[in-house]
Image (cartoon, coloured by chain):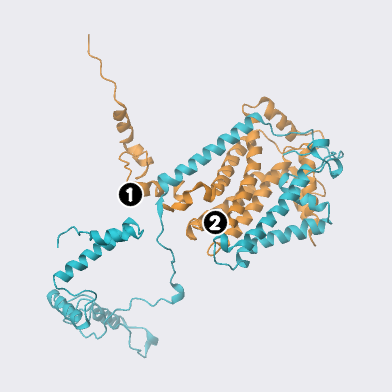
Amino acid sequence: MSDEVQIDQEVYDRLIGEGKSERIARAKAKAASVRKQKIEEGQSLGPKPAEEASKALEEFRSSRGGGGGVATKTAAPADGGSGGRLTPEERAQRVAASLGNGGDSGSVGVPASSDHTHRLLALVPPAGIQQVQSKQMDKVYTWPHLLLVEFVALLAVGSLLLIVSFFLDAPLGSLANPNEVPAINKAPWYFMGLQELLAYFHPAVAGITIVGATVALLMALPYADKNPSARPENRKFAAMAFTFFLAFWGILTMIGSFLRGAGYEWVWPWVQGLGFTL
Amino acid sequence: MPKLPKPPSYSDVKGSVQDNVIWKSIFRPGSIYRKGYRDTSRDRALAAMNNVLYHLHPVKVKRHGLKLTYTYCLGGLSFFLFVLLTITGIFLMFFYTPAAGAGTEIAYMNMRELSASVTFGGLVRNLHRWGAHAMVFAVFLHMARVFYHGAYKPPREFNWVVGVILLLLTLFLSFTGYLLPWDQLALWAVTVGTNIAGFSPVFGDQVSFVLLGGVQIGPETLLRWYVLHVLFVPFITVVFLAVHFWRIRKDGGISGPL
């Protein structure tokens, strides 16, 4: 067989025709050509039968001069006396035995009288094994691909903010005076939904109950939503519910911000002007 | 005419700048500023791994996450605005004293002077103000984006909870900052907001007292909210940001594809 595995052009063309990716088609075509070659040489395909495999292993071992991967029986015999502790001599003896120095075995770590076929290194409870369930995915290098996108986004938003800040001054009213309530008295915009609710309900309901419930609901959301799918077509109810939630707060915020004027009375901004300060 | 020495070429200068002990001690292998950076898989991986900022990212990211319409960069922009607000905030701290009260309206005077006589004072204050609003908005949008992509689903449930906490911290940061100019707008907006806190069940009065440092908004409130705004809340926020970013990596990077 040559070093370079030739691809089976026929298989390759067929797979490409079926819409398989170039990588998969190439790999399968290579495998097909290897298989074909083996058949031509009269070799058997697939895993070797058991006796053939053990014969090959035997040959391999004798050529290496010793029992290659044969493992030891390390379980200590339950000895009485001294409460399970070993005397230094016993320990030295056991170490020597487990290293195989006492016997005629050709390889280190394997005692001569061994009837085990594997070595138990550690017992790991199933719960201790971290299950990594990640699929092979189409990935790209963070540098330069992602970092470039992030840098452009950062520049765009940074410069937009700079331009806005250059032309638009932050408001600064007159000095704070606890004795003079301003005509238009509003919270920052992100609390306007809340202030609007206060116009309808007692503060204990609007301020505490509804807000507390909203926060609790948001935090409990991932535990409450048992639908495993993230596809939009499988989450129509969730998307609708969340849209209603956003719309509820959005509309309240809009009303509070733009449709309320002096004394928190309902006004039309095109009649009495915009009673809104950022 | 004596022959003048030829000026060194750009690549000569670049080589001698990059090929010395100091430069190489600053830029770790894989840095694009180090000599011998090649556009290979190895150096691309090292560039992300060996930079203190970039290594918040994994070496490789899922391709669909690059699409602008998947994340709209909202989480990253929220963080960028947080950093921008920290920087502009530090600048503003140099010119601000959280002192109010009859006859000592230093805080408000500082605000007037900031725009009038501090170089770039007004601009930096504007950046801080508009940046704060933009950050609140970006965090809201980020939350909505994460919801519509179902990105809070296992194993990312806890990171959503951390995100909700970060949203509340963002609102609290913005709200505490709202009082600091000590003008009518600030005083009364905060009065409206804190009145609500006074209605919390059982401990309403105590909550209100702790928040205001008294029974009503006064000079003590200003000092209290100043410390909350410039130190306490940012500190807590940074802790939660660290957890938030760390969990993104541990939960398998960006969610999706849908």
Q: Tell me the SS state at disc 1.
A: helix
Q: Which residue is mark 1?
A: B42
Query: Farthest residue toward the top?
Result: B1
Write down the quadrant of residue A173 in the picture: top right
Horizontal side of residue B156 vs A103, given as left or right: right
Q: Tell me the SS state at disc 2.
A: helix
- Is the residue at mark 2 from the same chain as the one at mark 1? yes
User: Would residue B152 be visible to someone looking at this image?
Assistant: no
Dot 1: few (<14), some (14–19), or many (≥20) neighbours within 10 Å? few
Instruction: Tell which of B214 and A244 is nearer to you.
Output: A244
Residue A116: assigned label: none
Q: Which residue is mark 2?
A: B243
Horizontal side of residue A3 vs B115, given as left or right: left
Q: Is residue A272 above or below residue A99?
A: above
Q: Is residue B25 above or below residue A109?
A: above
Q: Nearer the viewer, mark 2 or mark 1?
A: 1
